[in-house]
Image (cartoon, rainbow, N blue to C red):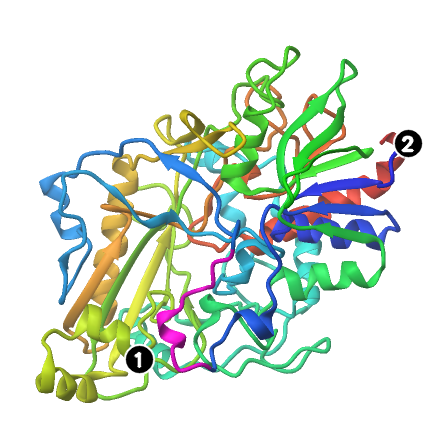
Amino acid sequence: MTDYDAVIIGAGAGGGTCAYALTQQGLKVLLLEAGPRFSPSRDYPLNQEDWETQSFPEKPLSQGQYSFAPMQKLEPRWKHLHSWSKNRGNYVLGEHRTPSGKGYHHVRGVGGSTLRFTGEAHRFNQHSMQMASRFGVSADWPIDYPILEPFYTKAEKLIGVAGIKKVPGRPRNGNSLLPPHPFSATSRLLKKGANKLGLHWLPNSRAALSQPYDGRLSCNYCNNCNRGCPRGDKGSVDVTFIRKAEQTGLLEIRTECQVQRLESDQNNRITAVLYIDKQNNEHNVSAPLIILAAGAIETPRLLLNSASRASPQGLANDSGMVGKNFMETLSWNTSALVTDKIDSFKGLPSDGICWDYNNPDSIPGVFGGCRFSSSTAEVDLVGPVSYAQRIIPGWGQQLKRDMREKFGKVITIGAIGESLPNQHSFIDLDLEKKDQWGNPLARIHSFLPEMELNRLDFMALKCREILDAAGIQEIVEEYGSYDLFSSTHIFGTCRMGDAPETSVVNAYGQSHRWKNLFICDASTFPSSGGGESPSLTIEALALRTCHWININKSKF
């Protein structure tokens, strides 16, 4: 006997959504989270004088451990893609690509990386779901867009997504959206440049309330979503799915619990989850349903660390695909000074977006699309400290004069593009670097093939072209994925598919072999899309998985 109907590992977009959906079905759920719990009102002090010197807060265990394999050598022909700023010069001085800061930007905690995400809430472009059959790259999704559409609608209503109904490549039945947010001065200027080039600049779909909704306040446009939202108007998982799950009385959350391995039996079932709590005590818990939602790095790590006599290559790894097909954030940002003071530190991050090149065949000479958006807040140019450190050189009286003159005049346009899987990009175990319990860390192998570099080249040139069309010519900072590994969106390391020989889970996230094991995070994505933020798709997939479980729960 067990006290729970389901054990969920990870409280981010996938795990939190599953906790909501299963408790709505009347199931008793245990949610194990490796990180801590954050309090929006206490932990995100945006009202303090030193707000800019603090990024999203770090707490004990709120960051995972991982390592990097050596990265590729930089080539002179791509020197125009180097990251640089007016103050610092080139950000990478060596000959090889290198991680930017921590490299993989994430949060472990109740709500996961949605605690610090910008809050873009994108549906996946339906044309990007058949990359293999249409273009001979990546892999096809085992489901099509119409199957996922009603679950997108449900997720949008639960979150309170604000946006417009007609977005290219994403048809919808009915309207589940709040009114779109107004454009900031930054987006109005970028819209001018985009329109001059014949491009469409649209209100972005945002998990930030444009009006009071479901007991939550509307956005106050402080432009600091990435530092955490103290008001609760950003639709992070903790104030949406998990809040509603806890209201049922059927959810128990245990934080700072480090899952060590999954145990299995000869009947192809997961029999136990072994974890260590915050007091360093070891526990063993079981349930008819086990849902793994630890993200595209920690999910394959746990499966590989759960190798046994029955699964010598790692749990759910009969295909050898666990950890393979790693896809990262392919990104570029260009920042420039404008003539007029437009207070670019005000507004809503990524309020405007251009989808014209989002289709996988829309960029000449490459397969895989991209998108462009306003990114001033995402690159953290929202306060005077960042200006003084990165944009405005000098010191003393001259620095003060320049700061008074130029603060609020920098705008950024950013691009995110398709990341195609390749044999050199994957996650494996680092047998030399281990955590405090002796488990090997996940090791990130990242490589950008020629097609990725050509796509990145297009993204960089188009960013500059849009700024130039808007009459903005003084570029002061640029950085991107060519020389810096800096990923928030990662995918693909436990691919879903119909064939057990080439995938890890089926179309419902269910392991092909271990029938009570489901994976509900971005590791199941067969392709990354052309720049879409993945959280809404993770949530829609999780809702679909739990709907299927409800129909078939007698089997578990």
Q: Residues within 10 Å of mark 1 (few under 14, many from 20)?
A: many
Q: Quadrant of residue 471?
A: bottom left
Q: What's under tag 2, amino acid-wise?
A: Met
Query: Looking at the image, which residue is at 21% across and 70% down?
Result: 389
Query: Looking at the image, which residue is at 85% across and 47% down?
Result: 28
- Tell me if residue 479 comes above or below residue 325 in the rendering: below
Tag nearer the camera, 1 or 2: 2
Query: Looking at the image, which residue is at 54% across and 77% down?
Result: 180
Where does label 1 land, which residue? 189
Check residue 1 in the rendering and tell me which mark sits there, or answer none. 2
**Left or right of residue 442, residue 245 in this image:** right
Task: Specify the principal SS of the magenta part.
Answer: loop
Say which quadrant the C terminus sits in.
Answer: top right
Q: Is residue 162 visible?
A: no
Query: Looking at the image, which residue is at 21% across and 57% down?
Result: 461
Q: What's under tag 1, amino acid-wise?
A: Leu
- Tell me if residue 214 comes above or below residue 465 in the rendering: below
